[in-house]
Image: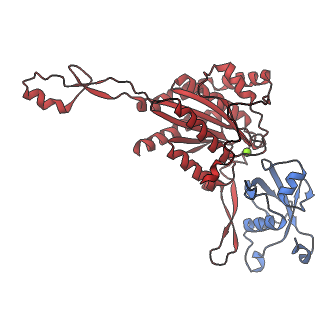
Chain colours: A blue, B red
Amino acid sequence: MSDDKSQVKIKFFTKEEDESLQVSDTPLFVPISLKRYGLSEIVNHLLGKNGESDEAKPIPFDFLIDGVLLRTSIDDYLIKNGLSSEAFLNLEYTRAVLPPSFLASF
Amino acid sequence: DGHFDDNIDDIDINVDFNEPPRSMDEARELWKSSELATQELASGLCEQLRLILEPTLATKLRGDYKTGKRLNMKRIIPYIASEFRKDKIWLRRTKPSKRQYQIMIAVDDSKSMSESKSTELAFHSIALVSKALTQLESGGLSIVRFGEDVKLVHPFDKPFNNQETGTKIFQWFDFQQTKTDIKLLCNKALKIFEDARSSSNTDLWQLQIIISDGVCEDHDTIQSMVRKAREEKIMLVFVVIDGINSNESIMDMSQVRYEQDPNTGAMNLKVDKYLDSFPFEFYVVVRNINELPEMLSLILRQYFSEVASI
Ligand SMILES: [Mg+2]
C-alpha cells in the first residue's frame, strides 16, 4: 500500500506577538509528506494570506518541533525521532529568517 | 475492485503465537474497575437494546385458530357465509422467529488512542457494550483488536464468562500500534462475518460496532468498503471516543487536502472539517462514558428504522 496518503494530526502555534499572524489552535490532519513550503502554505491559507495585495501577501514561515527547526518532511522527522503517524505534533511557526532567494530552493 | 483483498490470505485470524502485551493481573484489575464503573449503565443499555431489537425478533401471526390474538380478516366472510361453522378465524403468534444477531466490537489499539488520552474511555466502552450484549442474550459476541494488524481476541462461538473473558480481552490492548488501518479492519471483519455466517442457517443479522478515536486516513477508499459491507448486510456503527482534552475535539479538527483544478491542473489547497468526509454514515461522538448508552441506542434505532424502510 502506498504511503503517500498517510496523514498526521498536528497543531500550529506561534510566539509571534502580531495577532494577525496567529491561527486557531484546533487540530489539523495533514499529509506527512509536507515540508516547510507546504506547511507555510497551510498557515498562510489559515491566515487568509493568499492574495496579491500587500496585507494578503503570503509570508514565508519556518517551523519548529520541540524547539528544533524542521529541515525535512514531516515523514522524515517522524522516522528520525522514532515516531509514527499516530503521533500528535505541536508545530511552532515563525517568520522565516532566511533570505527569500534561499527559501525558494526548498 | 480486487485491491481490497490484498493481504487477506497472509493473516491467519485464528492462530496467534504472540504473547499478549499486558499482564493478566493488570488486565484483571482494569476489567474490574471498568466493570464497576459501567455496571448500571450496562443494565440500562441492555434494556434499551431489548426495546430496539425485540420488535425485529417478533414472531409472525398465523391462522387459523378457534381462539387467538387477532382476527384474520380473510376468514370473516366465509365464517358468516357458513353460518358460523367455519370458525377458525383467529391469528396466533406461533412460530418463534429464528433471527439471530452477531455483534462484533472492534476496538482501536493504535497509539493515537493513548496520545489523545482515550484509553480509559475505550476500556470502559468495551466493558459496557460487552456486558450489555451478554445480558441481552441475542446471539454471538466477538471482540476484535485493530491498528496495524487485526486480531480476533474473542470469537463468536465462545461464551463470554464475564471476568475471565474480560481479563483475557483486556490483555490484548496496550494502544501502542503505529498505524490505524481501517481498510484492513473492514476487510478482515467481512471475512470473519462471512465465516460466522456459513456455520449458521438462521436469519442472521450482523452488526459491527467500531470503538476508536476516529482518526483514519483515506476516507474515499474506506467509504467504498463501508458500502460493500452494507451490500453484504453487515451494519457498521462507529463510536468516536473523543478523549478528555477539551481543546482537541475531533469535532473541531480540520483536514488538509489538495484538489486538482480541472482547467489549469494546479493543485489547490483545501481545508475542511474532518468529520465532513468521515466515511461512516452511522457514527456518534462520545466524550463521556455516561453518554454512550444513549448515543448507541439512538444510532441503532436510526439504523434499524432505515434498514426496515429498505
Ligand atoms: Mg490511530
| Residue nearest the observer in this picture, A62 or A7 | A7
Vertical comparison of B40 with B56: above or below: above
**Dividing the picture into quarters, in which one does residue B210 lie?**
top right
**Dividing the picture into quarters, in which one does residue B242 lie?**
top right
List x then y, in percent, for residue A21.
80, 66
Q: Note whether residue A19 is visible.
A: no
**Dividing the picture into quarters, in which one does residue B265 lie?**
bottom right
Identify the residue shown where x is 57% and y is 34%. Answer: B195
Q: Which residue lies furthest to the bottom in this view?
A: A53
A79 horizontally vs B303: left or right:
right
Q: How many numbered tags mark residues here?
A: 0
Whereabouts is ligand 1, in terms of quadrant?
top right
Identify the residue shown where x is 64% and y is 37%. Answer: B106
Q: Note whether residue A68 is visible.
A: yes
| Residue nearest the observer in this picture, B276 or B235 | B235
B274 horizontally vs B44: left or right:
right
Q: Residue furthest front?
A: B9
Identify the residue shown where x is 70% and y is 27%. Answer: B169
List x then y, in percent, for residue B131.
60, 25
List x then y, in percent, for residue A1.
72, 53
Q: Which quarter of the figure is the C terminus of chain A placed in?
A: bottom right
List x then y, in percent, for residue A54.
78, 79
A32 horizontally vs B154: left or right:
right
Vertical comparison of A57 with A70: above or below: below
